[in-house]
Each structure stands twice: as structure tokens, then as C-alpha cells.
Image: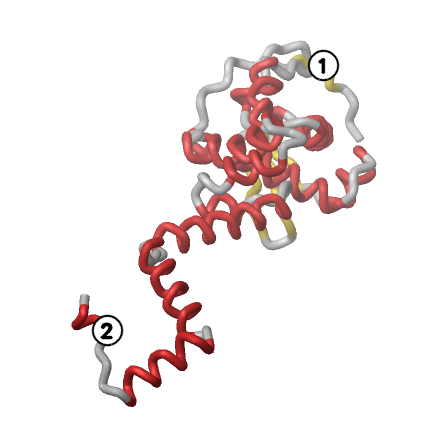
Amino acid sequence: MNVSRGFLHITYKLYHHLDLVDGERKSHCLNVFLSVMKYAWKKNGYKAGLRHETIHKDTGLCRTTIKSCLETLNKVNIVKSVRGRSGKTYLVNETFLRAEKLYEPTQIAVKPTQDSRFTATLEETISINNIGKIVKSFAGDTEKILDELSKLPLDELKAETVNVYLCKQAIQRKEDKERESKATYVNADKILSALSKIKKQANPRYREKVEYNKRNGIKPWENK
């Protein structure tokens, strides 16, 4: 492999942009990004056709984690995934890089211009950020986490790939709340009145009195 690359400046803009991803997942994404950069050179337009096996050898991460990280990097517009006939090509967003130098020849690259292929949208940023932030903010308080998650859009909960179990519980809670909001409840006085009536009718003495009144044509309510 060509190792003439002198150095590469990966900006803090990239590092802070990955604050959208919480905890250990952020470090995995950085690891995968560095592996992609090992093969994506300026002379190739920062493009590289890679297999997961190659990234696995570089990072030691399992293929499931690598796939998840590449999907995340694609969603936050850091590494674009382009499917081709023989696999995927990964295109690095130069916005997160500084000019690169080579040993031979010595030439500094021009400042990259914004690429329309990496136009970020607010919806993409929020969809990755919300669930992780809620789980992190209320760590240890499952009930609070589920209450907050149940307030998120259903599509966002179903699309989550990290906190899958919590999201399933949140979806169930969300559906329960919707059913409860549409439920029709009977007035408490009506329930108490019905229970009192049942209690009287179950009393043998009461039933005897009713039968006696019927036989003798007695109507107690007329004497009131």
C-alpha cells in the first residue's frame, strides 16, 4: 500500500459533529472513519471501494458494528455510501478535512468547496440525537426514559437500531396512552348505584320482601 501520505488533518469540526452520537458508539465511528481514510486519498477524490472485511482487519470491530457505524456516518453526512455493481464505494466529505500534504511532490491541496451531496438536513441530525440523549440524560430511571421516549414520533422509535428494547417498550406505552385517551369512562356515581342494586338483589331477605309485596299487590313507593 502507498504510504507516501505525510499527514492528514482531521478537524475538530468532525469530532464535535459526532457528538450527535453518544458514548462508545462515537469512538467506534471514529475508528471506522480512520479506516476509510486509510484508503480514501485526495488524488482519488477521497473515495474508496471497501469491504467490511477490510475495515474489520483495520479496527478489530465486528461486522455488525462496522455496518451500524457506516450507516451512522452516512446519516450525519461524514461518509457517503454509494452502492455499485461490485460493492459499496465510500466518499468522504471534505468539509471535515484540512488540506493534505504528500512527501512527493510537496503540494498543498486547495480549500475544498461545499459538496451538494453532503447537504445536511435538520431532520437527519435530530433523528440520531433524540433517543440517545434521552437514554443518557435519565440513565438509571427506566420509567422516566420510557415516558420521554413515548413522546417521540413513532417512525423515529421504529427506526432506532441501538436502544431497540427500550424503543419497543416506549412504542407499547405510546399505544397504551393513545387507547387510554380515547377510552370512555362511566361516571363513578352510576357504578356505585349499580353495585348497591346488585348487593340488594343478592340479599335473600330483600328478595323475600319483593316476592311478598308482589303477591299482595303492595307498592311501597306509593306510600312515600
Q: Quadrant of residue 195?
A: bottom left
Q: Amino acid at mark 2?
A: Pro
Q: Position of residue 118 (x, y in %)?
A: 47, 31
Left or right: 103 in relation to 76: right
Which is nearer the N-term, disc 2 or disc 1?
Answer: 1
Q: Position of residue 134 (x, y in %)?
A: 56, 31
Q: Is residue 122 visible?
A: yes
Circle 2 Cα neighbour tier, 10 Å, few/some/many (<14 / 14–19 / ≥20): few
| Near-viewer residue (17 or 84) | 17
In the image, residue 209 sits, relative to residue 89, either above or below, namely: below
Quarter of the image with the C terminus is bottom left
> Mark 1 sits on what residue?
7
Please report the residue visible at 56 percent of the width from the left and 16 percent of the height from the top.
Answer: 13
| Near-viewer residue (55 or 195) | 195
Cβ atoms at labels 2 and 1 below 8 Å apart: no
Please report the residue visible at 35 percent of the width from the left and 85 percent of the height from the top.
Answer: 211
Quarter of the image with the N terminus is top right
Left or right: 60 in relation to 93: right
Q: Is residue 39 visible?
A: no
CA separation in Å, label 2 and label 1: 103 Å
- Badge 2 marks a residue whose secondary structure is helix
Numbered disc total: 2
> Mark 2 sits on what residue?
220
Please identify, in this view, whether the residue under mark 2 or under mark 1 is nearer the observer.
Answer: 2
Please report the residue visible at 62 percent of the width from the left and 37 percent of the height from the top.
Answer: 142
Q: Quadrant of residue 114?
A: top left
Left or right: 195 in relation to 10: left
The image's mark for residue 67 is none
- Badge 1 marks a residue whose secondary structure is strand
